[in-house]
Amino acid sequence: MADSSRGTALRSAGWVAAGLAGAGAATLGYAGLIERNLFGVRAETLAVLPAGSPTLRVLHLSDIHFVPNQQIKTRWLQSLADLEPDLVVNTGDNLSHPEAVPPLLEALKPLLRFPGVYVPGSNDYYGPMLKSPFQYFTGPSKITREPPELPFGELFGAFEDAGWAGLTNRSDSMVLRGVRLDFSGVDDPHLDRDVYAGFPASGPATGSGEDDMALRVGVAHAPYQRVLNYFTDGGAELILAGHTHGGQVCVPFYGALVSNCDLPTWRAKGVTEWEHQGRIVPMNVSAGIGTSRFAPVRFACRPEAVLLTLTARS
């Protein structure tokens, strides 16, 4: 009887192990083959514009991580032009392959006809490298050996030729539908390249003319807290960032386990409010569109673009 019971227990354990292995394989297949291609648009409405301003539609793109022959991603990116945004904001990490620039520009071509601004991410400068995913649980990932360089000059030159303004450690302004947008952007904080340049000198809400119809927007790739504090203290009224991939592999009903920076994981995706020195600023962190080509999976964190409808404050 003892041997029979032991055999039954072993068979039961075997079935449980096989079931867990099968579930794990199914989950990995879903994350790698299905969810990472379930592209969507997250829509948010933010009342941040000065009273009396017309509504502005801002399309926030981040972390495209493009690789040649990504046809599903290409068609989806091209379709975003149907949203007819007033402005496109690109928060970096466009590339994941040294030959990705021409096909990426083809995918973005319909969007390049709209006004835009951009900042770089580390995967515009350098290609991804194979690494253990468990490294992300020890803190933000760091470059530990010489990475392959990417043709970022070609990419950013094309952005500039299309009229998109680069915000790499600089400020700039543009007027859209009678509203002046004052931008301050930084180079990638994840590479410690950020140098805060402040906002344009003629700031908003000074009580005269067009300054009353202005909005200050901080733009960064990686939402490190020091940069969020720079923007907030400088008078930002909206902050846009990416980098986190929303955690990329999340726990259902819990969320992100890592943010790959010092941002709390509950802020790794979506609109939250950043507070510093008594000022509170709405911040949108995009979960991003792609993944590293060495970790092409997403789970409980679908790829996204974000359509921000900016309305006047009451």
Image (cartoon, rainbow, N blue to C red):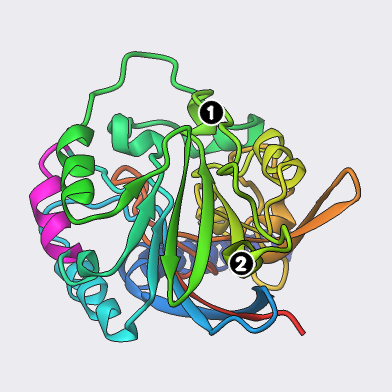
252 displayed left or right of 78: right
Q: Quadrant of residue 212?
A: bottom right
Type of secondary structure dominating the magenta stretch:
helix
Q: Which residue is mark 1?
A: 194
Q: Which residue is mark 2?
A: 209
Instruction: From the top left corner, tell me how far across and down residue 165 is, in percent.
Output: 33, 49
Residue 160 lies in the magenta-colored region: no
Instruction: From the top left corner, tell me how far across and down residue 313 is, in percent.
Output: 73, 79
Instruction: Report, in whole angstroms, how far the alpha carbon at label 2 lies from the one at label 1.
Output: 33 Å
- Disc 1 is placed on an element classified as loop
**In this picture, which residue range is highlighted in magenta?**
98-108
Amino acid carrying mark 1 in the image? Asp
Dot in front, 2 or 1: 2
Query: Which tag, 2 or 1, sits closer to the chain's start?
Result: 1
Amino acid carrying mark 2 in the image? Gly
- Residue 7 visible in this rendered orientation of the protein: no
- Disc 2 is placed on an element classified as helix
